[in-house]
Amino acid sequence: EGLGLRAGEEGERSRDDQGRRAEGGGASQGDLDHSHDPPPPPPPPAAPKPATKISAQKFALIKSFLAQKVREVLESELSHVRALAPGESVDERDSSNADAENESGISQGELVRQYLEHQAALGQVKTAAELEKEFDLAHKVINHLVKRGEMLTVLLRPSRKEEEDDVTYLQRLQDERILTYHSTYVPEDV
C-alpha cells in the first residue's frame, strides 16, 4: 500500500486496522493515525547561482582601482581637516588627523559609480549588458575584499527603515554603506 509509510510500519498499521475491523469498527481514512507519517518533503532548493569567474589580472586591476579611489578620498578628507584647523598645535592636529583617517571613507555606490565611469572612459563598457556585468563584478569584488578583510572594511552601515523589506534594505545597504581601508591593509603606491 502506498500510504507513505516507512519500512516496518506497514505491517504494524495492518494489524491495528485488522483489530479495529474485528471489533466492528471499520477504519476509514479519517480514523487512521497520521502522527507517524513522515513530514512532507521540503521544497526543492533554489538553483545555486553560478560562481563568478574572474582572471587574477582583472581582479588585481579592480582592486588597484578601488585602492586608488579610497586613497584619494582619504587624502582629500585629511587635507580638508588640516585646512580647517590652522591654529592648533602639532599634537592636536595629529590627533585630529588620526580621527579623520579613522572616520573617513566612501560609499560603496560612489566607488562602483567611479569604477564604471573609468571602465566606460577606457572603452571597456559599450552596452547595457556589459555595464550590468561590470556593475555586478565590482560589487562582488568589493564584497569579497570586505569579507576576507584583505583591503576594505565597512565603516558605517545605514539603519534599516521600519517599512523597508529585506530586499530593499539589502540593496540600499550595498549602495550606502561607507567603506574604508581595513586596519591591516597597507596601501601601496598606487
Image (cartoon, rainbow, N blue to C red):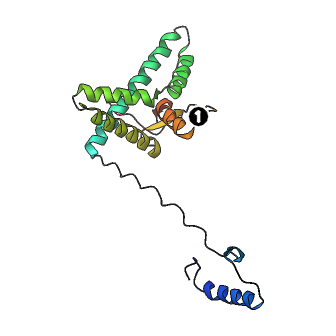
Residue 22 is situated, as x and y percent measured from the top left of the image, at: 74, 91
Identify which residue, 21 or 54, lies in the foreground: 21
**Outermost residue to the left:** 123
Say whether residue 37 is left or right of residue 138: right
Look at the picture and state if 77 lies above or below 159: above
Q: Residue furthest right?
A: 23
Q: Which residue is situated farthest in the top direction here?
A: 87
Residue 163's spot in the image, x, y percent? 62, 33
Instruction: Give how far across and how far down residue 60 sits, in percent.
Output: 30, 40
Q: Name the residue nearer the viewer: 121 or 77.
A: 121
Quarter occupied by residue 89:
top right
Q: Is residue 182 left or right of residue 10?
A: left
- Under mark 1, the amino acid is Glu
Give the residue at mark 1. Answer: 164
Secondary structure at badge 1 equals loop
In the rendered image, the quadrant that contains the C terminus is: top left
Query: Around disc 1, counting alpha carbons within 10 Å, would you say few (fewer than 14), some (14 to 19), or many (20 or more)?
Result: few
Q: Residue at x 55, y 8 (%)?
A: 87
Residue depicted at 42% across the width and 19% down the height: 76
Q: Residue at x 27, y 46 (%)?
A: 55
**Position of residue 155 in the picture relative to residue 140 (left or right):** right
Task: Residue 107 in the image: state x and y as whole percent.
Answer: 46, 28
